[in-house]
Image: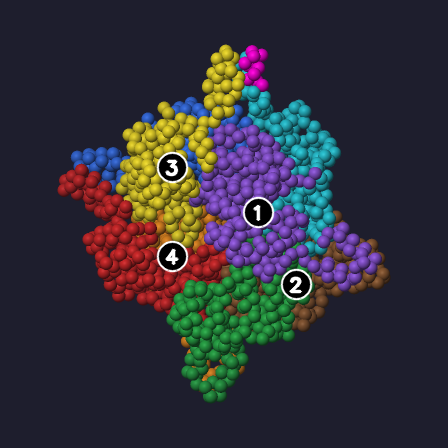
Chain colours: A yellow, B blue, C purple, D cyan, E red, F green, G brown, H orange
C-alpha cells in the first residue's frame, strides 16, 4: 500500500465509509501468499515488474509447481524459471506446458511477448563456453519484451572479430558483456560503446581464474566509463537490468 | 571515424574529390593529442560523452594543468577532475579558475549545466562516513546535467530512516546506493525501487570489512533484481553511469 | 570436580573419612568414558547442558551407536545427532528408536521436552533454500526446551514480507537470523529488534557468495547492535546459544 | 509507531478526535532529527536501549558536538563516544564536560549508572595488548548498567593463569573473550563456562595473523558450544550484546 | 587487412579498378568463419602462427568436429586439440584420423613436423605427478617444430637429480619449468640457466598448495632473473611461448 | 658423493690408481635410478634416512610397483607408501606382501622395527575425525623406530580430557598435535609441555574452516613457544620430523 | 604443582602435617605474579625454560620495566626482550644495564651463557634483507646456550653460494632457514641436510609476495622431509625451538 | 666451474701438473666475494649476464656502496641499481658518479651501450601512472643493449590509441605490456602481436584492484597465446627477460 492509497484509506475511515477495525486489518494485509516454504509476492509484478521469475536452484519440483500454480491463479501469463535442472524440468513438463532450454537451464511458461523496449540490446560473449550464461541473459531480456542481438565468441584476443561488429555495438541501447578468464571484453566494449555496459563475469577458465574471480576483478576495475558488474554467472540479473534500462519511463 | 564517414570518404576518393594518399593519412589520423605522458582523447566527448573528466590520482600538477589546457584549447567548457589532492588543487587554483570540493576531492572548471535528464537521480548512503564517495557521485551526475536528491545516513540498521523517504525512492529514475560495512543498503533499496540501482561499496569500516570487500561481496550477491555494482569507492563511475541511463537517446 | 567439592574432599581426608590414596585417585578420575575413538563427556551435561548432542559428520555408524549406547547407559534421555547422513540414519534406525529429519539431517532419540525458557525464540530465513539450516537451529532449540516461531523466506529484497512479522520480531527473546547470498537479513532484523540476534550465514548462493563467505562478512560487519555471528551453516550452534540465553539462571 | 499506537490512532480518527489529515502527517513523522550529515535517532533509546552511543570514527569534531547537543536537548543523560581520537576529545573537552579514556579511545558524558543486570560479566583477554579492546567492551557494559570483572593476560599458552580464575568464569552471566593471534581463548573459556561467550578477535599479532583474520577464523570454528563472534576489535559490540543478554526481561 | 593492403586497395579505388562499394565491403569482410557458436580464425595462422589449436574444454564433440572440418577446408594440415576428454576423443576418432594422448589429454591431427627451431627446448618437472602438464607443453612445442628434451622428477628436494642434468640446462634455448607444491624448481633452474625460463605452476599438491596457488606465488616471486610465469596447469601456453622464442625471426 | 669421498677420489687420481676419465664419470654418476617416470633415490637412505617412503598420490599402480621393486633390488627392507587408495592397495596386494591400513590409507612392506629413539612420542588429536591423519603420523614414526602414545579426542573445548593426560604430555620427547576447526590444541599443549610440538592442521571442519586454513593460521600464530607447523593433513611430515628429533645424534 | 607434589601434599594432609585449609590454599596458589596489566609467569622457567623472554611489541616502556624488575626480583639473570623499538630501548637504558641490538630490535639483560647444546645450529638466509629476522633467531639461540653458525645471502637463485657451505649444512644439529620472496631456501636445505629444518618465511619482497604469504605457502608445501614452519618473521620462535631440539634431555 | 673445466682440471691432476690438494681447494673455491652481509657474485656475469644489477631495496647506503666498489674492482663497467630511494641516491652521488632517474628510482653507473639485440623492444603502458614501472623496464633493457620504443597511455578503454600504433606492435621482437587496474592491455596486445609478450601487472588502481592482484590475475588468465607474466611492478624482471629473448644465440 503506497502513500496515496494510505491517504485515501484514512479519508474513508474519517468519513465512516470504512471502520477503524477494517482499516487496521487491511493495513496489515500482506501483498503475498504464504505457501509455508515460500512467500509468493504478487504486488511485486506491479511494484517491480519481476513477479514472473522463479529462481529454481535449491527448490524441489513440488515447491516449484506450487509456486507456479499460485502465480497462475493470481493471473500471471508468463513465468520464467532459472537454474532449472533437466530432471526437474522433465518432472514439470508432465504437469505443465513448460518449454525448456537445456543450455541455459531455463524453463518458460507462456508466450514470448513482442519487443516493446526503447532500442536493441546486445549480448556479447568472449568465448563459446560463455554461451549458457549469455542465453540466460538473452532469454530473460526477451521474455521481458526486448529485441536482442547475440554476438558470441568475440573475445579480445582476436580483436578483429569484435571490431567487425562495431556497428551493432555503437547502436545498442544497452550491452551485456559476458566473459570468463581475464574478462577484458567489458573494458574493450565499454571503450567502444556510448551506452551502459553490464558486465557478467563467468566461471569459465581454470587455474588462476578461481571460478570467475579473475574476470570479476577485471570487470570491477574496468577503466572504461559506463560499466557496472553483476555476480559471477548471473545472466538473469544482467538481462533483467538491461531490460529495466531499455524500458525507462519517458 | 565511423562507418558512415568511411563510406563517404571512399565515395569521395572514388569521385576524385580526395586523393588515395590523403584518405590514407586521414584514416590513420588519431582522434587524440599525444602529450607524451598522456594521450588526450578529443573524439571521446562525442563518442562517449566523458571527455571532460580527468582522473587526478597519480598525475603531477603539471600534467593535470597540461591536460586541462589542451582540453580547453580544443573547446571543452566543463572539466571535472576527480581524486584531486588539496595540495594539487591549491597549486592549480593559482593558475586556473578552479572550484574545489574538499570532501569528495573534486575540482571543477566551468559552470554546472541545467539538468536535462529524463528524471531525478537519488544518491543514498548508509552512513555519514560514506558522504565523500556520495558527493563524488552526485557532483559527477550534476556536471553531466542531472537533478540529484541526496539521502544520507539512511542505513538499514534504522530502517525507518530509509522508509521515511520511500516516495523519493519510488519515483527515482536511477538510484546510486552507497554503503560500507555490510553493504545491505543496496539490497533493501533494490527491493523497494523499480528502477536501476547502482551499488557502490565503500572502504568505510574496520576489521572484517577488509577495506570494502565485505560491502562489495554483499552487493554482488544482492537478491534484489536491478542491482549492479561498481568498484569500491568509485563514486565517479556510479554517477557517470547513472547519468548515462538518465539520458538515454529516445 | 569443582572448588567446593575439592574443599570437602580435603576436609574428609583431613578427618580420616577418606584416605589420601583414595582422594588421589578420585581427583584423577576423569569425568568421561574413553571409548578409544572418542571420549564421551558425562559431566558436561551438568557443567554445560550439552551432553546429549553428537556431531555426526566424520563418524562411522558403529561409532555413533557406541556413543549413543554409552550415553544411554549413563542415563541420557534425549540425544540429538546432527549432520547425520540418510544412510547412517537408516542403519541406526534398525537398532535404535531414532526419529530422522531428512531436511536438516538430524536424528533424535527420546521425546521433545515441554518449553521452559524465558520467552519465545524466532528463527528467520532469507530464502527457501536456507530452511535446512534453520530447521537444525529450530530443532536444537526445541529439544533444549524452547518455544520456536519460524519465519521463513522473509529476505530483505521484499521488505514487506519481513515487516508483516514485525510483531513476532519485536516480542522475541532471542532471534536467529539465517541467510546466504548477501546476508543482509541479520542487519535489518537487528535494527528492528531489541533482543540478541544470532546471525547464521549459509552457503546458499553462487559465484561471489564463495560458499557463505559473503554472508559471513556481511553479518560480521553489521551496523546494528546486538548481533553476533556463528560459523557458516552452523544452525546447531545458533540454536544452542539461543537456548542458553533463553534459559539464563535467575 | 508500533501496532498498538497505530490501532489507537485509527480509533481516534474513526471517532473524529483526530482528523485524517493529522493522522496522515503523524504516521509520516519520523522518529529522528535530520542534521543533514546524520539522522539522530531518538526513538531508538526506547526501542533498543542504545541511543546514547556515537561511533566517533569518520566524523568531524563539529559533527560529533552537533549530535551530542541534539541528544542532550532530547533529554539524553549518558552518552558514550567510541573510536574517539585524542585530538577530537581535546577539542570536545573545551566545550563539553567529557571524560576521556585514552587506551580504549572512549569519551563519556554523564555519570556511570548503578549496575542493574541479572549477574556479573567477565571480560577476559589473551594478552596485555588486547586491553584497549577489552576496555571498550567493559566501559560499554558499565555505562549500560553491568558489573564487570576484568581478567587480563590469561592466554591459553599459560593455562594455569586462566584456570586460577575458574570460579569467576563458572559464575559469570556472560563472558566476553578477547584475543588476537591464534584466538584460542574463546574455545577454552567456552569449554569451561556454561554461559554465553562472546568472542572478540583482535588485530593484535603479526605475519599470518593478517590483522585479526586468524583469530576471527579460530573463533568462528570454535568447537565449544555457546560461542558467537563479533567483528575484529569490536569491543563495543561485544559489551553492548553482553549487556543486552544480562538485562533480559524475565 | 594490414597497412600495406589498405594502401593498395585505396590506390585501386582511386584508379577506378575497384569501386568504392566493393572496397567498403572488402574492408568489412572478416578474416574468420562464423559457425554461430564459434568464430574460426583463419588469418590468425599467418598473423600469429597458432591457428591450428582448439581449446577442447567446454565444447561439445559436434562443435569440435565442426571447427576441425572448417579448418581443414581452409587448408590446415596440423591441428592440436587440448583439454580433450577421453570420451570426446573416442567420438572424434570414429570420424577423424585423430591420434590421442591420454595423459596430457591431447588430440593431434596430421603429422608432427621436423624441428626447425633455433635450439633445443628443455621441459622439466618437479615430480612424477606433473608429467601430464609437461607432456601438454612438450607436444605443443613439438607440433610447432621444436626439439624437446624431457627432464622429469628433478625436484629441488633432491638437488643432485637436477644437477646431474646441468649440461642440458646450460645449453637449452628455452626451459619450461613445471612444478606444483612449493614450486621452487623455477628459481633453482633460473639460477643455473642463462636462457628464458617459463614457469608453469601445477595444481599438484594438497592442503596449503591451494590448487596451485602456492606454486604460482613462489614462481612469481622468483629471485632468479629471466623467469616468467603462465597460468596454473597451462602446459599449452608454456609450450607455445617457448616455441615462439625458439623461432624468432632473424 | 660427499667431501671426503671426493678428496679420496682425487688422491687416487693423483696416484694413478684411477684415471681422470674414470673419475670424471664417477663424479657424474647419479645416486639414483632413473625409471623414466621417476628418479628413485638410493643415496637418500643414507643421506637423510627417508628412502623407504613412497608418496602414493598421483602415481599409477604400475609406477608404485616399479618403484617398490627397484627399492627392494637395492636392498630396502621396509617401505612405507602414503596416500595409497584402497583400489591401488588391493592391486598391489596381489603382487606384493603389502599390509594396508585403510583409515590413514597407508601401505607397509616389511616388519616394524624395535623402537630405538631417545624417548616417547605423543600423537594427540582434537577430535575423532582427525584420527586418519594421526595414524599417518603415528605409523610413520613407528616404522622409523619410535614408541608412540596416542591421545585421541582431547580437544580444548573439554579441557579436562586433555588435562587427564598431563603426565604423558609432560614426559614426551616430541608431541604431534593434530586438530582441525579452530586448531587451538597446539597452543594449549605447547603451553603445557616443555618439548617440541609439531602442529598438524587438518581439513576437518566446515564453513569458515576453509579446508584447514583456519586451523593452519591458528597454529602459525600460536603464542606458545616451541611450536612449529607442517602442511594441512600432513601426518607423514609430522611423524617423520618427530622421529628425526627423537633420534638426534648425542 | 605436578602429580608427584599433589600426592605428597595429600599424604601430609592425611598425616596431619598440613591442614586441609592450608592444602586448599596452596593448591590454589598461582605460579605467577599479577601486575594488573600482565601476569608474570615464574614457574614457566622450570616448566618450559622460556621465562626470561618478554615480547616487547604493544607494551609501554613502563610495563616492560615493571616486568623486568619483577623477573629480576624473582632471580632471573638473563632476560631477552624482542620487538623492542629504538625509543623504548633508549628509555630503558637510562634505568637498566640493557644491551640493544638495533637490527633485530632485541634487548638483552645479563651475560650470554656458554654454549651447552648437543651440536651446532645453522641460521641461513636467502638474502641480505632477511638478516634482521635471522639475528633475532641467532641471538635467541645464543642466549639459550647454543653455538650458532650464520650463513647469510645464500639464496637458491645462486646455488653455488649455498653449495659452498654444504659441509656446515651437513653437520648441523638443527638448521633455521630464513627467506622471503619465493621461500625456496627451506626446500633446498631440507633436501641437503639430514637434521630438522625450521623454516621462517619473511615479509621481504613486493607485489605477489603479499607480506610473506608467498614464502609461507612455499615452505608449508616443501617436498623435503624434516621441514616445519613458524610464523612470518618469527625469528624468536625458530631460535627458541632450535634451542629446544638442541638441548633434548638425555 | 663447468664440466669442461672440471675435466681439464682432472687431466692436469692426472698428469701431475696440479696436485690433488690444490685441485680439491680449487673445486671448493667459490665464484663470489663474501662481504659478510652479501655474497657478490662474479661468475654470474659470464654465467647469466646479470652481474651488474643491485636490488637496492632493504640495503643500507653503505652496503650498496660496498657492493658497487667490489664489482668495480672486479672490472664491472656498467652497474644498474633498482629500487633506489632518492635519499640513498643522493648519499651515493657524493661518492660515486651515479646517474639517478627519479621516476623509476633507478641508479646507473657507467655509459649506456649501443643496442646490439636482434630487433626492437616495445614497452607499452595502459595509463600515465604506470610509467615508473615502464621506465624501470625500458632502462633495464637499454643498459643491456636493446633499442626500446615507448608506447605510454594506450589502455584498452580507448582502443584507437593502441590501434594507432599497430605497426610498432606488429614489428616488435618482444613486447612488455604494463598495466594496473583490469590489466586487459596484455591480452589485447597479445592478440595483435606475433611475438612474445611479457605482461607486468602494476599496483596502480584502488578498491578491488587489491594492489595489483586484479591485473595480475587478468594477465595470468589471458586467452591470447604467447603471454607470460612477472611479479607486480617488476619492471626490471620484464626488461631483463625481454633483453634475454632479444639476444638469443642464433
Which chain is indicated by disc 1? C
Spot occupied by residue E201 in the image (x, y as percentages of width and height): 43, 58
Q: Which mark is residue A65?
A: 3
Q: Residues within 10 Å of mark 4 (few under 14, many from 20)?
A: many
Foreground: disc 4 or disc 2: 2
Relative vertical location of residue D137 with respect to residue F92 in this rendering, above or below: above
Q: Tell me residue A189's x, y (percent).
A: 35, 40
Mark 1–mark 3 distance (CA, rounded to whole Å): 36 Å
Report how far apart the C-alphas of labels 4 and 1 lie in the structure: 57 Å
Q: Position of residue D11 (x, y in %)?
A: 56, 16
Q: Chain of mark 3?
A: A
Disc 1: which residue: C110
Q: Position of residue G232 (x, y in %)?
A: 57, 56
Residue displayed at 43% across by 71% down: F93
Label 1 vs label 3, nearer the camera: 1
What separation in Å lies between label 1 and label 2 (alpha carbons)? 39 Å
Check contact, mark 2 vs mark 3: CB within 8 A.
no
Q: Residue at 71% of width from left, 62% of height from top?
A: G47
Q: Is residue A121 left or right of residue B71?
A: left
Magenta stretch: includes residue G185: no
Residue linked to disc 2: F169
Q: CA distance from mark 2 to mark 3?
A: 61 Å
Q: Secondary structure beneath disc 1?
A: loop
Q: Nearer the viewer, residue C76 or F196?
A: C76
Q: Which residue position holds label 4?
A: E234
The foreground one among C91 and A229 is: C91
Q: Which residues are magenta?
A: D8-17
Q: Nearer the viewer, residue B8 or E146?
A: E146
Lateral position of residue E157 relative to residue B17, left or right: right
Q: CA distance from mark 4 to mark 3?
A: 45 Å
Amino acid at each position: 500500500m503506497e502513500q496515496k492509497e494510505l491517504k485515501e484509506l484514512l479519508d474513508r475511515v474519517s468519513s465512516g465509509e470504512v471502520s477503524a477495525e477494517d482499516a487496521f486489518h487491511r493495513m496489515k494485509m500482506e501483498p503475498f501468499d504464504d505457501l509455508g516454504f515460500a512467500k509468493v509476492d504478487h504486488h511485486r509484478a506491479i511494484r517491480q515488474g519481476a513477479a514472473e521469475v522463479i529462481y529454481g536452484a535449491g527448490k524441489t519440483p513440488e515447491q516449484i509447481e506450487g509456486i507456479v500454480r499460485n502465480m497462475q491463479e493470481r493471473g500471471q501469463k508468463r513465468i520464467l524459471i532459472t537454474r532449472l535442472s533437466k530432471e526437474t524440468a522433465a518432472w514439470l513438463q508432465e504437469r505443465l506446458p513448460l518449454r525448456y532450454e537445456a543450455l541455459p537451464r531455463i524453463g518458460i511458461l507462456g508466450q514470448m511477448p513482442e519487443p516493446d523496449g526503447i532500442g536493441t540490446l546486445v549480448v556479447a560473449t568472449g568465448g563459446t563456453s560463455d554461451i549458457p550464461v549469455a542465453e540466460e541473459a538473452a532469454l530473460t531480456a526477451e521474455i521481458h519484451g526486448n529485441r536482442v542481438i547475440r554476438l558470441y565468441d568475440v573475445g579480445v584476443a582476436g580483436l578483429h572479430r569484435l571490431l567487425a561488429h562495431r556497428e551493432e555495438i555503437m547502436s545498442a541501447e544497452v550491452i551485456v558483456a559476458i566473459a570468463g578468464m581475464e574478462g577484458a571484453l567489458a573494458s574493450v566494449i565499454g571503450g567502444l560503446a556510448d551506452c551502459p555496459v553490464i558486465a557478467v563475469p563467468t566461471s569459465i577458465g581454470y587455474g588462476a581464474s578461481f571460478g570467475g574471480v579473475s574476470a570479476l576483478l577485471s570487470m570491477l576495475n574496468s577503466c572504461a566509463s559506463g560499466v557496472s558488474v553483476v555476480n559471477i554467472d548471473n545472466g538473469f540479473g544482467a538481462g533483467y537490468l538491461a531490460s529495466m534500462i531499455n524500458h525507462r519511463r519517458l
